[in-house]
Image: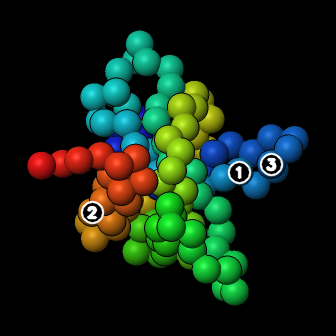
Amino acid sequence: MSRQWETWMTRGDEQDPHGHPLIVFSNDEACADANRASLNVLFGSTKRPAMASRPFEIVCDEADGFEKSTVIDCSRIFFISKGKLGHRLGSVSQVRRVQTCRKIAEVFRLVLH
């Protein structure tokens, strides 16, 4: 079972044998609900040293459970099958959780007052 803010790798397949890093964005109740077959996630990719982050991305690292510096796209929230989760890496740090929420609010132009 997964929990909100955990970092995972997806299961590999023919197109992507290594899997893809992600952050579970669904709340704990949705994660635990056996009647829900899917979860909301934020996908990431390995950050290339020479590449600057784009305005809709945050950068996570080992403190967030990722093996390498990982760019998380906060402009798209994906819906994936729980069965696509491969192996758990860790959990997003408190600092990065705040950054993620702020970035999502910024990207989607959510007014929070």
Q: Quadrant of residue 71?
A: bottom right
Mark 2 to mark 1 CA distance (whole Å): 26 Å
Callout 1 secondary element = loop
Q: Amino acid at mark 2?
A: Val
Please name which of the two marks, 2 or 1, marks the residue nearer to the observer.
2
Marked residue nearer the N-terminal end (3 or 2): 3
Q: Relative to residue 88, is residue 11 drawn left or right?
A: right
Mark 3 to mark 1 CA distance (whole Å): 6 Å
* Circle 2 Cα neighbour tier, 10 Å, few/some/many (<14 / 14–19 / ≥20): few
Q: Are marks 3 and 2 in contact (CB under 8 Å)?
A: no
Instruction: Residue lying at the far bottom in this picture: please name it.
Output: 50
* Circle 1 Cα neighbour tier, 10 Å, few/some/many (<14 / 14–19 / ≥20): some
- At a point 57% along the width and 51% down the height, the residue shown is 43
Q: Amino acid at mark 1?
A: Gly
Rendering coords of residue 95 (x, y %) = 28, 70
Image: 21 above or below 24: below
Which residue does the numbered mark 2 point to in the structure image? 98
- At a point 42% along the width and 53% down the height, the residue shown is 107
Q: Are marks 3 and 1 in contact (CB under 8 Å)?
A: yes
Q: Amino acid at mark 3?
A: Asp
- At a point 29% along the width and 46% down the height, the residue shown is 110
Please name which of the two marks, 3 or 2, marks the residue nearer to the observer.
2
Query: Is residue 59 or residue 32 the one in the foreground?
Result: 59
Q: Relative to residue 21, is residue 17 drawn left or right?
A: right
Q: Relative to residue 25, is residue 20 drawn left or right?
A: right
Q: Quadrant of the N terminus?
A: top left
Marked residue nearer the N-terminal end (2 or 1): 1
Callout 3 secondary element = loop
For residue 19, which numbered disc appears in the image?
1
* Circle 3 Cα neighbour tier, 10 Å, few/some/many (<14 / 14–19 / ≥20): few
Callout 2 secondary element = helix
Which residue does the numbered mark 3 point to in the structure image? 16
